[in-house]
Amino acid sequence: NGAVAMMIIGAVYWLFAWVPFAGLKIIKPNEALVLTLFGNYYGSLKNPGFFYVNPFCVGVNPAVREPGAPQDAAPAAAANTAGALDLLHKKDSASGKKISLKAITHNNGKQKINDLLGNPIEVGIVVIWRVVNTAEAVFNVDDYRDYLSIQADAALRNTVRLYPYDVADGGDDNDGQTSLRGSSQAVANKIKEELQKKVDMAGLEILETRITYLAYSPEIAAAMLQRQQASAIIDARKMIVDGAVGMVEMALEKLKDGGVVELDEERKAAMVSNLLVVLCGNRDAQPVVNSGSIY
């Protein structure tokens, strides 16, 4: 009977021996641990170091969850205190109960959105964010990572629809008009402002947003390329014509001031026509020399 009693006492001891060790917590820099006690918020550990809390406190972090693992299962009885602390720290990190306070990068990928003019475009952004209020991040939303991702997509769509892909003349922004291509930083700041308003309730801070990809959708990319090429050709032709007219005016003035030759209006018109053809032509001119009289 004595042996049986000792076995029972030993079993009970090993069954409850882990309870004191369950209250030992190790927090690394830029880590936090949100604790609940019997369903009530108990507090958050944010400073790095070694802590002892109520052994029945449970760490909570719904953003990362190990499938099939208990929410805060106690480790098996360890041979010594150092081994127990090491197991506890590994258990907290592996199960995702600790919340990272570091700056995190979220890339939402490419989204197909219609701009202000209805043109389908593809836009991608990257969001730099961090957790600033661990309690709000854990208890105000179901999963703060998923919440941020969905709100980033919504903010991107709502903002892109307010601007055209490019200004009307195909160049840089003029007359204060904002476009996605010409004012990408201003658009990114607008996305950041709207996204910050949405994630305030989740205890998140948006540090920066950047547009990483911007292009027309494949179905209209070829047509838009032709449009840009035509606009560039027109701009180049305008510059060529302006230069050619200036050169013709200068030539006529030089001939008149130097008294080289006197031309009537008809000959001036012919000279102007020939010079414009030579200066504005796409190919090199092949002049014909007239050895006779001009009249």
Image: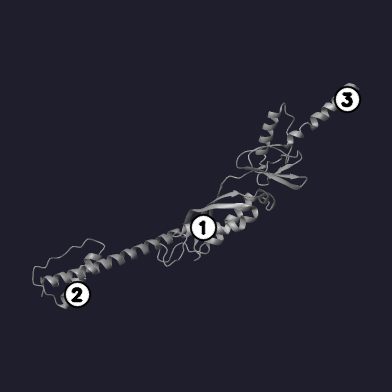
Corner quadrant of residue 201: bottom right
Rendered location of residue 220, percent (x, y): 46, 60
- The label shown at residue 53 is none
Corner quadrant of residue 35: top right
Q: Please name the amino acid that badge 2 sits on.
A: Ala
Numbered disc 2: secondary structure? helix
Numbered disc 3: secondary structure? helix
What's the distance in space between the residues labelled 2 and 1, CA to CA?
Answer: 57 Å
Q: Residues within 10 Å of mark 2 (few under 14, many from 20)?
A: few
Tell me: 217 left or right of 17: left
Q: Residue at 50% across / 59% down in the picture?
A: 187
Q: Please name the amino acid that badge 1 sits on.
A: Asn
Q: Residue at 80% across / 32% down in the picture?
A: 16
Rendered location of residue 257, percent (x, y): 13, 72
The residue indicated by pointer 1 is 189
For the rendered model, the colour scheme is one colour
Confirm whether residue 216 shows in the render: no
Q: Please name the amino acid that badge 3 sits on.
A: Ala
Q: Quadrant of the N terminus?
A: top right
What's the distance in space between the residues labelled 1 and 3, CA to CA?
Answer: 72 Å
Tell me: 157 left or right of 250: right
The residue indicated by pointer 3 is 5
Tell me: 290 left or right of 278: left
The residue indicated by pointer 2 is 269
